[in-house]
Amino acid sequence: MNLILLAPDDIAHQGLARVTDPRRLRHLREVHRAAPGDRLTVGVVDGAIGRGELLSLDAQAATFALEGLDQAPPPALPVHLVLALPRPRMLARTLEHVTALGVKRITLLHTRRVEKSYWMSPELEAEKIRQHLVLGLEQARDTQLPEVTLARGFRPFVEDTLPGLLEGRRGLLAHPGMPATCPRGLDEPTLLLVGPEGGFIPWEVERLLAAGCEGIHLGPRILRVETAVTALLARLF
Amino acid sequence: MNLILLAPDDIAHQGLARVTDPRRLRHLREVHRAAPGDRLTVGVVDGAIGRGELLSLDAQAATFALEGLDQAPPPALPVHLVLALPRPRMLARTLEHVTALGVKRITLLHTRRVEKSYWMSPELEAEKIRQHLVLGLEQARDTQLPEVTLARGFRPFVEDTLPGLLEGRRGLLAHPGMPATCPRGLDEPTLLLVGPEGGFIPWEVERLLAAGCEGIHLGPRILRVETAVTALLARLF
């Protein structure tokens, strides 16, 4: 927790914030070993970053006096990430990684090799997803919450949604065996599609290429989804 | 498990291999749903890659007839990674990530902000470390086991070990706030140093720079060690 992310509910009134949830209180006590008078980095959800002077900390609440909330959050990556829905534990970690790296738009997509049971996971509840996004923001000292969309059908996604996403974005399909190596150092708006463990099936690859995506690969090594996504984002941007 | 990694013990005699450990037997049954006649990718530790035809699979053993063990493993990254010892769970995952990405030399280093208790963790036993390396190799279809060295003192490392590691290698110290951005697309031998959660302390940074390392950064975002290491490797090579 390199930034204390304040939701509107946490801001008691002008210049004062109260944090009351057990996770953050425990972190303040046990990791920060915070004491009144300490100045910590705080940020407002979808807003600015500044400092908070800890006024009090007990089992129920931490109270901060806010100062100089005038810094912008770090720049976002110019990417919309379309990720075949990973298994629940991998999803949780991947959401944290990509949020920390600065991804702001995420679509979780059904594909043939996504197990249908993954769509029933409690990890897909909005509140659970938000928890992982918040952990990623707290890690990276960011405040802008990513938007996560669920696309429960491959065909409707390709036919109805993908053309709009590709307007003004360069579409990159990351898939083993594609002809081009992953480009480096892009700064243009990009749509990055990453398949599930086991990959997209050939029909899915065909459809995505036909829709205008370029196929790219990361080399001969087969990587876990969470490793591949981080590696792709770090190489692309 | 995209490759069945055979240790010398697994190779029964010329052309035949037996896998008897419960983890791999369960994976063959439950994930591969393998049946006699299936051909799977196999590799020999520190050796070549080929195919194995499954002859039999029961609760005690899987037997393979080996074919064409003549493919080279994928190329390694030209990097020696020096990593401040992470907490045990992070260590396990990071070893898997970096092995999958192709790192072959790893030094785990003590620094001021590494908790001393981490050095007592059972995760540091040679057999435990080997398990994580094997998982990384199985994931990436590689056979070359990385070498992992423990450096339990920062000062002896800098004074006695580092000068030798920097002979013929470009030393890169990844640390927030360093002046240069992380370079891209290197193919020269590199020594990459990554600090603990919380970073190297200023004295450590000074010593590493004085020894000839260049300071590099990944931008304003603070990343977890496992995210940062994957991102650095993907951007550098």
Image: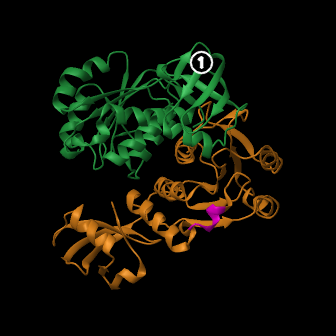
Chain colours: A green, B orange
Q: Is residue B119 magenta?
A: yes
- Residue B211 in picture, x, y percent from top left: 81, 51
Q: Residue beneath label 1, please?
A: A72
Look at label 1 and name its amino acid: Ala
Q: Is residue A210 magenta?
A: no
Viewer can see residue B37: yes
Q: Residue at x 48, y 66 (%)?
A: B144
The magenta segment is B117-121
Which chain contains the residue that carries disc 1?
A
Q: In this view, which residue lies farthest toward the bottom? A: B13
B213 vs A3: above or below: below
Image quadrant in which the N terminus of chain A is located = top right
Viewer can see residue A74: no
Crowdedness of circle 1 by 10 Å Cα count: few (<14), some, many (20+)?
some
A82 left or right, relative to B116: left
- Residue B41 in picture, x, y percent from top left: 30, 65
A219 vs A124: above or below: below
Q: In this view, which residue lies farthest toward the top? A: A14
B216 left or right, relative to B224: right
Q: Residue at x 27, y 50 (%)?
A: A198
